[in-house]
Amino acid sequence: MTYQVFCQVFAPGTWKWTSKDPAAVGMQLDGAFRAFATEVNALPSNASTPLSVIRSHADATANRWGYTWQLGHPADPAHLWFITDSLTAQGETQSSSSAMFGSAKASTFSDTTGNGGYGTYSNSSGNSTGLAYVDSTLTGATSAGAILLIARDTTPGQEFFCWALKTYGGNEDLHRDSCHALYKSPGTLGWNSIAIFPKTDRQFYGQIVLHGYSGDRFGGLPSAIGSSIYASGHQLRSGIALGHYDFVLQPQGLFDSPPPLVQLPAPLYIGSTSTRGASTHFGRVTRSDGVMIQLGQRSSDRDVWLWVPTGISHNQSSPWRSALSLSQWKESNELHFITGLPPIGLQLVTGSADFIRNFPHMSAVGARQHPQQGPLLDPGSGGGGGDSGGGSDGGGSPGGSARPTSGLLWPRGI
Amino acid sequence: MSSRTLIDISRIGTAVTWPSVTVEVNGYLENWIAAANAQVNQHQLRIATAPNPAATASDPCGWRIEATLSQLTPGGEPAVLILEVFLTGTSLRIMPGIGNSEPFVGADNELGWIYPAGNVTSSTGDWSLTPLPLNAQVGWSLTPGAEYFVFAYSQHRFTNRQAMPLLIARDQVSGHWILAASPPSTTFDALRAVSWNARSGQPAGSRYLLRESFTAPVMIRRPAELVIATTDWSYYESANEPAQFWQPLILPPDFAALNISSAALNYYKLPDGSEWLGIGSHGLLLRIKEANTNPPPAGGGE
């Protein structure tokens, strides 16, 4: 099957992130990821970029719980992890980071049982986040349960694996939901990653973490999200470009065209829901052609929703089940979902002397390039459309070019 | 009339030029609207108020443009888009709106219309009465499905003297007209646009183009998309309005977005062979020359 969405519910009293039980959330997430990895690794297009599991809940030896996944690469694979480091994080009493979302090159990894069983890295980066609840068998958290949702697509070219962990019960304001997706973006061969930990009034480490792994390192994605999303507080968008996975070389004028844009995975809508919309974190909007369900939380930085078109189902066996039949997600309102259109063409306006692209019209150089003003300055050059318009061929190459054919030829394009 | 035209109507700037420029532009606009109405017969464009050639420096002078769409309002009447662009003294004011009376019968005042969104209201900029050279361009296209008319000028190099007083273009998604303008202003979101979103069934207003941050490398992005402002609007001012689903507002392929602003009437020659003219001070570019038929490998996510 291609796109599928399914989930499991871990009821209050049994919800326990800090557990190796095969039926508990950690190992169920591990199993779902392994199944996805097996399928996509079998695709010829992923032969050089296989996914694998480095660590899972099964490897936990102390107070760390989570996963480390490897993103394949022909020369230099990389690791991503989401690992909690508190055994007692419970709702309002939890005032500091209780989890880390990190990344590193696989070559910096020491495959030991240190760090709670998860091994250590000589060079890594991390982002603080947290879970509001990790164990509902503890006093004060017995009313908390959790839902693990998986959305996945194994279609070649649009591979997508997204998990969202949503706790529920008790004071709805205290929950901290997490969402992480690995995916292929058009034009890229390797894996991209987006992790969204919505920032809320009670959530101190909310953030959106974007990664594209370009071979030697992770590129932090400079985000066009800010300009894509109107800051009115209740707008979510799909189809936006998140940025380029290697940002550093472009200002040097080395590329005519930027590297492929990393795009937001098609089913995800990201935006700001701070002023209106779902009251907590289980919003749902039902339409004739599908259902939108909230994976994140009310947040200005950033909420995330998942589009589930009508007819989408899954082939997972029990206890996996359809997410749409759950009662936790309540019909919501007041939000705006905007289907965007990814850019179809981007070109850089480079600026070094040999790559003049920008001709200000107030300069003689610029005026000479202008389709109408240029010929006025230099009638012999032919120029473009002239005063008769006809813009489709305006600014064309000069007919009787006055450009010298020998001697100093700089600057080009004159 | 060729399908695409670009005319230079620059002035040397020895006099107060706005009335004479706008009257000249209006002549082209009347011809284009006649052709556009014949070609896009499901919608009707109308010049409700034309520039007054006898305007003094203190008289309002400019346009009120109305577009009656085939789209119906929730009240079952044709939706009417309105754009007012008037210079009074040194204040050039842009006012986007929609017809609010049912049915809309046209009214040369503000009573018959309202803003398209809560924060897509009027936008103003300064026109200099000091004689200054005026670079100005008028362009239009009657390419089916991609029709547009645009008027832009630059009084000097700074963004506070660059404007796009008029843009009428077909939305590439809905086929509706988009009425837009940007005043001479350094404010990044001073642009104003109004259209009608078929999917959400309500007006769509915008204050800026979707473009990369100014801290990103300078790049030209296509298609040119207007960021929809989704603030409260009177049809849905009641609490608990339903969630809305929107399609994007996309300008015709002759337009692109650039993430720098002081670009009015700058000229861009790109590696793919395409050439672009800066329009106004809010990052809009107009294509002058097509890309080569065999461009280098595209970089965009295609």
Image (cartoon, rainbow, N blue to C red):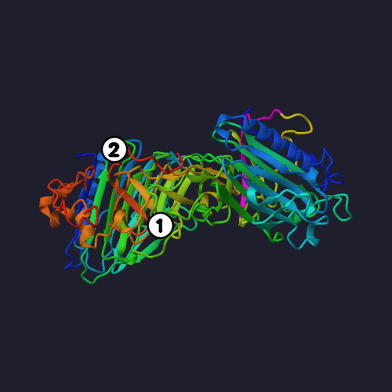
Say if the magenta span includes residue A312: yes
Dot 1 surroundings within 10 Å: few (below 14), some, or many (20 or more)? few
Picture quarter with the N terminus of chain A: top right
Disc 1 and disc 2 in contact, CB within 8 angstroms: no
Q: Which residues are magenta?
A: A302-315
Q: Is residue A37 above or below residue A279?
A: above
Q: Nearer the viewer, residue A30 or B211?
A: A30
Residue drawn at the location 73% of the way across and 55% of the way down: A99
Residue at 65% across, 30% down? A39
Against B15, residue A157 (above or below) is above
Residue A252 circle label = 1
Residue A113 is situated, as x and y percent measured from the top left of the image, at 78, 50
Query: Which residue does the image show at 83% across and 52% down from the upper left?
Result: A62
Mark 1 residue element: helix
Residue B149 position, x and y percent, is 29, 47
Q: Chain of mark 1?
A: A
Q: Is residue A286 visible?
A: no
**Residue type at mark 2?**
Thr
Disc 2 crowd rating (10 Å Cα; few below 14, some 14-19, many 20+) is some
Farthest-out residue, bottom: B130
Judged left or right of residue A312, residue A137 is right
Q: Amino acid at mark 1?
A: Gln
**Nearer to us in this view, B128 or A199:** A199
Disc assigned to residue B143: 2
Q: Secondary structure at mark 2?
A: loop
Above or below, comparing residue B66 to residue A231 in the picture: above
> Quick one: quadrant of the C terminus of chain A?
bottom left
For the residues marked 1 and 2, what is the alpha-carbon distance in whole angstroms? Answer: 38 Å
Q: What is the chain letter for disc 2?
A: B
| Residue B182 covered by magenta stretch | no
Q: List x then y, in percent, for residue B104.
A: 40, 47
